[in-house]
């Protein structure tokens, strides 16, 4: 049985601080350790079989192949497919592979871009893998997934029909690096079927962990050519896509371009043709064949108008899927272009950009307030405080854009096809100092910057010019009450700061001494009506006492809740409350009940999540968004609303657990031996 998710989240945060998930120390995907597995199977003379991504139909996925083909699939290791398998032959090239029977041209186009970048290739495809030396049927690849690098282990069994690979297949019959890389990415996505359809930007980001910019070519900026030239020099990954045709299928047009298809941008160059400069783009079709037939194609007469040197350098007359076309034809034939890089040098090479990022979450009824159209709930969205320092020195230019903001939806699903991207965006407001979240009134003013529109995409990116100062940035979905995780990243030309604009403070308001002394005799009299012969109450007696005297408009206190109350207030660990312990509990319950009804503005008999935040403030606690989300999940109903019983249970536990920490802490943290931990958690 795995540890609870909250524990796993704490472990992940600690691992992140320790550098886990970085380029040099990737996380182990599904907790599979390549080195340990490789050594074990090598030592014992077995071939690795991956139980986490087994050679079965479940790894193919639903709806990709007809049932009669599924029945014919045989999973085979490369040594059974060919006599002399090789992992890599004479280096890694975009000409090593052709697309198979899964619509993952977007992924293969990104591989084509990857093959140009040596450092990135070494990161994605770890060295030392071979069919000849230390072979144990196990391989691994690395990808960036939603904020961290992961090392993905696979066995080398590949799906075949009639002895032939059915998905990506090598152009050289015995080279298998690309087919195995495709399998590793299918494992990350959930299955091969989960790779069917996508955007090249997704794979480009998963190969770099960088930021990407998408350019709509029908609205291309005037300096697009300069951006592409800088990109070619700073070595990012570049891809593009064609618009979907009427059928929305991969239809080959008369000019050779394929509808609804992803391509790799493999070259950017300017040549002189008849003494006039011509801007050319080189593109690669991941089908491994099928090329542009217009001007500057392989057999175009335009090549006779350039110098012999340019013709020798650029022209290759071969149906290998790669071709040249003019910048004008490129913008007319393709709908969008993506540039992805770990550096923003392609936007401005004069400055070293800094990056800050934060992981957050929108939770329905808690921290998912929707866009600014929903003025009443917008404020409950996560809020982040950013501070931009002035740009110093010769690089300072008041007209330059100095802030790039990226908002990415983070998948919580094991299978990629189950992801349901929401329309997302963000707004930026001028900040003035305060502690905690800004209320709804603050957001009645207009933002100083925002996304142009909310987009239903994995990521939205905007580029701004903001004067140095402090701001509040609020990421949101378009509609309220849509639950999703996200990563907010800011790239700036100057030093910047990014932190969540909410805090956790657990100083709960105690009943005043005057309140405790008032009418103390009547409380004791009440207590004695329900005690046993030892003048104590157990959980059942406490339940009757509370429900007969404090029920009011609520449905009452359940037995489990009363057991929890006894455990929290039971100083002698007897399962009973004596008079002193009961009076401490009673005063608190009465106080929290008063806060509950005072903050139930809607008069519904329970607290909404916005009312809960106000109730916590009234009780003296400042609650961060992440803690509020946990409280709603643990104590709330289907829409997060809390009953009186749930609210009292919550705040009693919050007060008690904060006291436990302070009592046991050495000022930095808490150390517990296992038996101490078990005693504390099993009876509290």
Image (cartoon, rainbow, N blue to C red):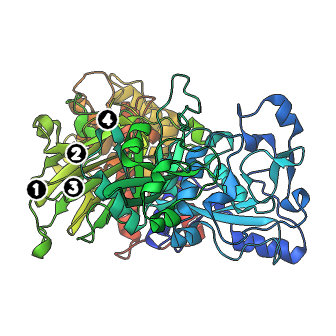
- Answer whether residue 366 is visible to the viewer in this image: no
The Cα–Cα distance between marks 1 and 4, rounded to whole angstroms, is: 29 Å
Residues marked 2 and 1 touching at CB (< 8 Å): no
Residue at 34% in and 61% down: 229
Residues marked 4 and 3 touching at CB (< 8 Å): no
Mark 4: secondary structure: loop
Q: Which one is in front in this view, the residue at disc 2 or the one at disc 1?
A: 1
Local crowd size for mark 4, using a 10 Å CA cut-off: few (<14), some (14–19), many (≥20): some
Pinpoint residue 337: horizontal percent, then vertical percent.
Answer: 41, 47
Local crowd size for mark 3, using a 10 Å CA cut-off: few (<14), some (14–19), many (≥20): many
The Cα–Cα distance between marks 3 and 2, rounded to whole angstroms, is: 21 Å
For marks 3 and 2, the one nearer the N-term is 3
Q: Nearer the viewer, residue 375 or 304?
A: 304
Q: In the shown orientation, is residue 590 left or right of residue 432?
A: right
Which residue position holds label 4? 454
Looking at the rendering, which quadrant does residue 100 occupy?
top right
The circle drawn on residue 433 is 1
Mark 3: secondary structure: strand
Local crowd size for mark 1, using a 10 Å CA cut-off: few (<14), some (14–19), many (≥20): few
Which residue position holds label 2? 617
Which residue position holds label 3? 385
Q: Which one is in front in this view, the residue at disc 3 or the one at disc 2?
A: 3
Mark 2: secondary structure: helix
């Amino acid at each position: 049985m795995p540890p609870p998710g909250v524990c796993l989240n704490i472990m992940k945060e600690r691992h992140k601080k320790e550098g886990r998930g970085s380029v040099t120390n990737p996380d182990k995907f599904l907790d599979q350790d390549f080195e340990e597995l490789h050594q074990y199977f090598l030592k014992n003379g077995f071939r690795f079989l991956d139980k986490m991504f087994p050679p079965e139909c479940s790894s193919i996925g639903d709806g990709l192949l007809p049932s009669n083909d599924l029945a014919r699939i045989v999973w085979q290791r490369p040594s059974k497919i060919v006599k002399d398998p090789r992992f890599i032959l004479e280096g890694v090239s975009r000409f090593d592979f052709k697309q198979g029977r899964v619509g993952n041209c977007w992924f293969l186009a990104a591989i084509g871009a990857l093959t140009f970048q040596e450092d990135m290739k070494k990161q994605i495809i770890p060295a030392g893998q071979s069919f000849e030396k230390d072979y144990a049927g196990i391989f691994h690849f690395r990808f960036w997934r939603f904020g961290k690098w992961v090392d993905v282990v696979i066995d080398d069994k590949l799906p075949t029909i009639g002895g032939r690979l059915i998905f990506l297949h090598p152009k050289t019959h015995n080279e298998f690096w690309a087919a195995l890389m495709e399998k590793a990415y299918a494992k990350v996505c959930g299955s091969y079927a989960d790779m069917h359809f996508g955007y090249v930007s997704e794979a480009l980001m998963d190969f770099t962990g960088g930021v990407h910019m998408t350019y709509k070519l029908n609205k291309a900026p005037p300096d697009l050519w300069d951006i592409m030239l800088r990109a070619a020099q700073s070595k990012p990954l570049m891809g593009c896509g064609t618009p979907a045709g009427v059928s929305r299928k991969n239809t080959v047009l008369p000019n050779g371009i394929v509808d609804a298809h992803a391509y790799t941008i493999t070259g950017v160059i300017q040549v002189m043709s008849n003494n006039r400069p011509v801007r050319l783009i080189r593109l690669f079709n991941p089908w491994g064949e099928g090329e542009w037939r217009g001007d500057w194609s392989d057999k175009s007469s335009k090549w006779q108008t350039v110098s012999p040197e340019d013709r020798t350098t650029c022209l290759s007359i071969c149906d290998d899927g790669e071709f040249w076309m003019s910048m004008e034809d490129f913008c007319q034939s393709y709908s969008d272009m993506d540039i992805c890089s770990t550096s923003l040098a392609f936007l401005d090479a004069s400055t070293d950009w800094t990056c800050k990022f934060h992981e957050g979450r929108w939770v329905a009824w808690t921290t998912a307030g929707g866009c600014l159209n929903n003025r009443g709930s917008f404020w409950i969205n996560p809020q982040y405080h950013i501070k931009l320092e002035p740009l110093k020195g010769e690089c300072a230019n008041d007209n330059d854009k100095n802030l790039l903001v990226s908002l990415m939806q983070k998948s919580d699903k094991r299978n990629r096809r189950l992801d349901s991207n929401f329309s997302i965006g963000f707004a930026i407001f001028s900040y003035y100092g305060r502690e905690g979240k800004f209320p709804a009134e603050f957001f009645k003013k207009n933002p100083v910057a925002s996304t142009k529109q909310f987009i239903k995409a994995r990521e939205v990116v905007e580029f701004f010019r903001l004067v140095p100062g402090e701001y509040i940035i609020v990421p949101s979905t378009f509609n309220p009450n849509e639950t999703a995780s996200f990563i907010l990243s800011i790239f700036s030309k100057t030093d910047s700061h990014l932190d969540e604009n909410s805090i956790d403070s657990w100083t709960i308001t105690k009943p005043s001494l005057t309140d405790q002394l008032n009418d103390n005799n009547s409380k004791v009299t009440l207590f004695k009506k329900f005690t046993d012969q030892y003048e104590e109450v157990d959980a059942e007696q406490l339940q009757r006492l509370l429900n007969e005297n404090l029920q009011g408009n609520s449905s009452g206190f359940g037995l489990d809740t009363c057991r929890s109350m006894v455990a929290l207030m039971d100083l002698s660990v007897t399962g009973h409350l004596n008079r002193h312990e009961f009076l401490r509990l009673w005063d608190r319950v009465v106080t929290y009940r008063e806060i509950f009804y005072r903050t139930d503005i809607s008069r519904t008999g329970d607290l909404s999540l916005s009312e809960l935040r106000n109730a916590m403030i009234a009780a003296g606690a400042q609650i961060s968004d992440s803690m509020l989300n946990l409280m709603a999940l643990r104590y709330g109903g289907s829409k997060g609303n809390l009953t009186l019983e749930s609210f009292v249970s919550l705040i009693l536990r919050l007060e008690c657990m904060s006291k436990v920490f302070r009592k046991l802490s050495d000022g930095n943290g808490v150390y517990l031996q296992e038996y101490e931990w078990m005693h504390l958690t099993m009876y509290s």
